[in-house]
Amino acid sequence: MANVNVPAGKGMRGGKRAKAPMKTLGRLLKYAFSRNKVATVFVVFFVLLASVANVTAASRVSEIISRLLDYKPENHAAFMSNEMHTVYMNIIIMGCIYFVGAASAFTYNIIMMYIAQGTLKKMRNEMFEKMQYLPLKYFDTHTHGDLMSLYTNDVDTMRQLLTQTIPQIISSVITIVAIFVFMVMYSVTLLFVVLLIIVAVFCLTKFIGGRSAKNYVIHQKALGSLNGYVEEMTEGQKVIKVFCHEQKAREGFKKLNDNLNEVGSKANTYAFILGPVNNNLGYIQYVLVAFVGIMIIAFGKEIGLLSIYCSVQKADVANRVAVMAGMMVSFLMYSRQFNMPVMQVSQQFNAIVMALAGAERIFEMVDTKPEDRGGDITLSYGEYEKDKWAWKKPLVGGSYEYIPLMGDIRFKDVVFGYTDEKVILKNISLYAKPGHKIAFVGSTGAGKTTITNLINRFYDIQSGEITYDGIDIKSIRKDDLRRSLGIVLQDTHLFTGTVMDNIRYGRLNATDEECIEAAKLANAYFFIKHLPDGFNTVIKGDGANLSQGQRQLLAIARAMVSKCPVLILDEATSSIDTRTEKLIEQGMDKLMEGRTVFIIAHRLSTVRNSNAIMVLEHGEIIERGDHEQLISQKGKYYQLYTGAFELD
Ligand SMILES: Nc1ncnc2c1ncn2[C@@H]1O[C@H](COP(=O)(O)OP(=O)(O)O)[C@@H](O)[C@H]1O
Ligand SMILES: [Mg+2]
């Protein structure tokens, strides 16, 4: 029910329910209000004041009406001076009470807005901070879209919950209780009539709502598929055009859109019926209350406090009718006022369920165990000797022992799989001596990138050991380990900023000259010079204004500026023409002096001069040796090299 208000585009996620709603609600409330205790007290106070004001104001009406009904022509003068005075006073009091109510509502809404905005700010901060320290594994199992929707949809439903739903529910509950008390005081019979209609409304809501909920889920699914389709087709525009599949894309969309139209009409028909039907039942309730009320007045039979009130007053019949009529008008107002918060609470229920599901997802992310920081052994750059890397081992007594970094990396019987079910690397053993260039070749999916992912501890191995200068990489502080590895990833990522900023990303304290020098070594200088603003050209949208090859050149320059003792190049030159690649290689040879390099390359000409070449297949090293050795073995490498067997 009341699902009509759900903004489009929430997709299927909106339909999911929280697993432990009460626990999540408690945590959320604590999160939002514990930091704002004083403000919270004020909010509760003003919500109370606003609801009580609204309820008490209506009771003035009975006073006014009973006074007016008491008018007798024979007492005209006395009536005008005494009774009318009371009537005016009551109208003024009523106005004042309503004004206090409005001012209170205004105040608590403003305070609540501040609390909510502050809470959301804190939450977004915590989420982002947390995200920076999540292990890579988390991103393998959570899509980009899911993560984005935490920051957008889920945070937004939380905002609604804090600024609208919670104050509304508090105010509704207070109003319901207060009105209930007033109604009991006035007339139990009439209250019974009111409750009867409310029960009818509930049954109807449940009946229609149940149908609509089923259709709503179907509707959400259809909406999700449509959104997914649009997203996919937007991303794939180029491919669609290449294969001239526009017509087909349109047909696919039309089908999904027709379906959405159909299920949407069904889901919304029920939801839209509900409002007007309930409204009209409200009018029926009005009529019934009026009818029964008049019966009570006519026959004077009433079990409620109203009759007691009348008898205590020992009033004459006319006076009694006046009092009762006044009360009845008040009661009619209450009966209208009563329905609204009852409906609101039942409608807000859905908003709460959705917001809690969102809160649960956010807390789940915030609660994910962060990547551990690694061991105690740290690395220093320039501390031990200018421009030199050194291991920094803590000694007892607070001093450090510096050991120059060599760049020796060894794998001993390494077994690894991204998941426990599937082993990717089987018993890999290899060594890279300082200054050696080790190449990995093999078909796509053989496990080349995976090997490099293990050196920098993007993932942890299942068994075996990886050592860096003889130290198990698990005992090295992760930040330092990664800082010492210059990595050019298979898919380059450029950030919004200038070309210079993007090169400097490799080492933040690099000077402009060093960045330009690195660009020259990477052979990126030439194309950068031809960009509109040279090194100050702003790169947008992950470098969409650059070619694939140019992006790779920037990534190489970035690695070169980092001055890392170990370089890992994962198909870093795959989109670069052979002539430029040769030039980069010359630059890189200079750079690689004294550095350990792992290189993964498609073109075997690139790896020819490596100290050792590993041929990988299905996660195993099937051949190893230098170029000459492998050629003379006449195995897989020989086949690849002579073209008898193509990569991929
Ligand atoms: N993040 C990941 N999660 C699960 N499996 C992965 C992941 N990355 C790669 N794989 C799988 O590991 C195997 C080796 O991949 P990879 O090392 O990228 O191969 P390549 O030799 O082409 O670089 C492939 O079968 C691939 O499907
Ligand atoms: Mg790869």
Image: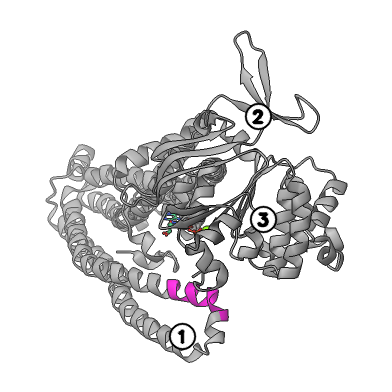
Residue 447 visible at all: yes
* Amino acid type, residue under disc 2 in the picture: Leu
Residue 18 or residue 416, whichever sits in front = 416
Expressed as whole percent of the image width and height from the top left, the position of residue 256 reads 38, 81
- Residue identified by numbered label 3: 609
Name the foreground residue: 344 vs 467.
467
Residue ID at (50%, 49%): 451
For the record, the magenta segment spans 227-238
Residue 234 image point, x, y percent: 53, 76
Q: Which residue is under mark 2?
A: 379
Q: Which of the labelled discs sits on residue 249, or is there none? A: 1
Which residue occupies the foreground of this view, 605 or 481?
A: 605
- Report if the CB atoms under discs 1 and 2 are less than 8 Å apart: no
Could you tell me which secondary element the residue under label 2 belongs to?
Answer: strand
Instruction: Locate residue 593: give its quadrant.
Output: top right
Q: Amino acid at mark 1?
A: Ala
- Amino acid type of the residue tagged 3 in the rendering: Asn
Residue 148, position in %: x, y? 51, 56
Q: Is residue 546 visible?
A: no
Is residue 123 shown above or below 535?
Answer: above
**Residue at image coords 47%, 35%:** 33
